[in-house]
Image (cartoon, rainbow, N blue to C red):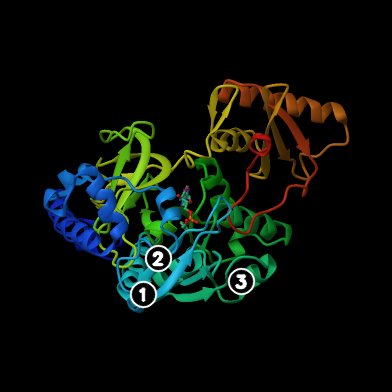
Amino acid sequence: MENYWNKEIECMPLEDMKKLQSERLVAQVKHVYDNVPYYKKLMDEKGVTPDDIKSVDDLHKLPFLTKADLRDAYPYGLLAKPLSDCVRIQSTSGTTGRRVVAFYTQHDIDLWEDCCARAIVAAGGTKDDVCQVCYGYGLFTGGPGLNGGSHKVGCLTLPMSSGNTERQIQFMQDLGSTIICCTPSYAAYIGETIKEMGISPDDIKLKAGIFGAEPWTEEMRREIEKSLGIKAYDIYGLTETSGPGVAFECCEQHGMHINEDNFIPEIIDPDTGEVLPEGSKGELVFTSITKEAFPLLRYRTRDICVLTREKCSCGRTLIRMSKPMGRSDDMMIIRGVNVFPSQIETVLIKQGYAPNYQIEVDRVNNTDTLDVYVEMSQEQFSDQIKDIQDKEKELVAAITQMLGIRPKVHLVSPKTIARSEGKAVRVIDKRKLHD
Ligand code: DLL
């Protein structure tokens, strides 16, 4: 049985959705052109006026907006409503340059929380559930977004934030949490800790998890599902487009439905900017058609994925996006070969390792080096050097087969790779330090 938060929208026939999107887009472009000089300038430079945009079919005429624009316009340059109408900001961690600050009116918050409510209901959530939110609270959008969605659904909401893992587990047991929301890497860590504490998945009441904010593989999904005894659902979003809830998984676990009544997706060729047909792999671009304070037109996410309108048996007609393989800037080019961390993760989990690993890339004597540090579990650990060398060789062969280039693999002792309570840092690219 599939439940919907807003059946009319989630199951809307395509024709009606296009009509709704077109009306909203036309109004949004006008709103932005009239109220944001930065956009007016971009559109004027491209020779487009709001009159040129009559339906979604005209979307491609608009200029792209990039993260560099957000930095240029920081902090108020893209604001489309008076500051006095805004009630909240959220922000990115700013680890890769100047942070992004997103503004919200109360209307924007309502729509955002509504999107998160759709995700919770699609994961089986109802007002009878106890929803433990262990995404970070504060400037990060994860905690506040899922917290708001959980309230809307009427779940008993546990605003835990991340960290203090034993306390998380204590609350989970004492209050009978049925849904957990956090990053997949933190979910894996909670699963590992539960096991260490001698608690079986049968001793907790969790039934579903809503995990996102970072790339994770199908293999990791199955591991988490096993360790927590749940069904694990993916959720996607970014601060620039409000936060989590831009897209969410249904019971089919086969791609995330995009809330396209609020966000129109496109896939483009990241090099040429050309719009690609459905089914092509490329960079995901979003236009937010309902946001008032911080609407972004044709925002380049740098996330690489595929869109499909293939029918989904959950009944939703909302277009689906595949799991992003990581940002285009997460992709490493090592000795001329494109490498995503997720490819390495797939191999490691298939070979029976937990997702505790770190990838180090460097350049020595003008040649790229790839070192993969993989943690052994207590059972995998051995004091026989030969055993460990054999296991390393196996991993080298499996990774070489996946990537087409040969890494160095270092099996390290249990508990030596730092666990993540938020977004895991999987890659250290030392080449960037030399450049
Ligand atoms: O991570 C929003 C969020 C919070 C999403 C909680 C889901 C759950 P940012 O910190 O701005 O926002 O980072 C956005 O994270 O462009 C993707 O590269 C990545 N990302 C988000 N969700 C997923 C996902 C939040 N499900 C960036 N799978 C995005 C893979 C994801 N990558």
Tell me the CA gap for discs 2 and 3: 45 Å
Q: Residue at x 19, y 44 (%)?
A: 47
Q: Where is residue 253 in the image (x, y as percent from the top left)?
A: 40, 48
Tell me the CA gap for discs 2 and 1: 9 Å
Helix, strand or loop at disc 2?
Answer: loop
Q: Position of residue 60 (x, y in %)?
A: 22, 42
| Labels 2 & 1 near each other (Cβ < 8 A) | yes
| Residue 173 badge | 3
Tell me the CA gap for discs 3 and 1: 43 Å
Kind of residue sitting beneath label 2 = Tyr
Q: Position of residue 24 (x, y in %)?
A: 18, 59
Kind of residue sitting beneath label 1 = Leu
| Labels 2 & 3 near each other (Cβ < 8 A) | no
- Report crowding for label 1: few under 14, some 14 to 19, many 20 or more residues within 10 A (C-alpha): some
| Residue 76 badge | 2
Q: Is mark 2 within 8 Å of ligand 1?
A: no
Q: Does the residue labelled 3 lie within 8 Å of ligand 1?
A: no
- Report crowding for label 2: few under 14, some 14 to 19, many 20 or more residues within 10 A (C-alpha): some
State whether residue 22 is above or below residue 293: above
In which image quadrant can residue 36 be found? bottom left
> Of discs 3 and 1, which sits in the foreground?
1
Q: Nearer the viewer, residue 27 or 191?
A: 27
Helix, strand or loop at disc 1?
Answer: helix
Helix, strand or loop at disc 3?
Answer: helix
Q: Would residue 236 be visible to someone looking at this image?
A: no
| Residue 66 badge | none
> Of discs 2 and 3, which sits in the foreground?
2
Which quadrant does the N terminus fall into?
A: bottom left
Residue beneath label 1, please? 83
State whether residue 256 is above or below residue 167: above
Kind of residue sitting beneath label 3 = Gln
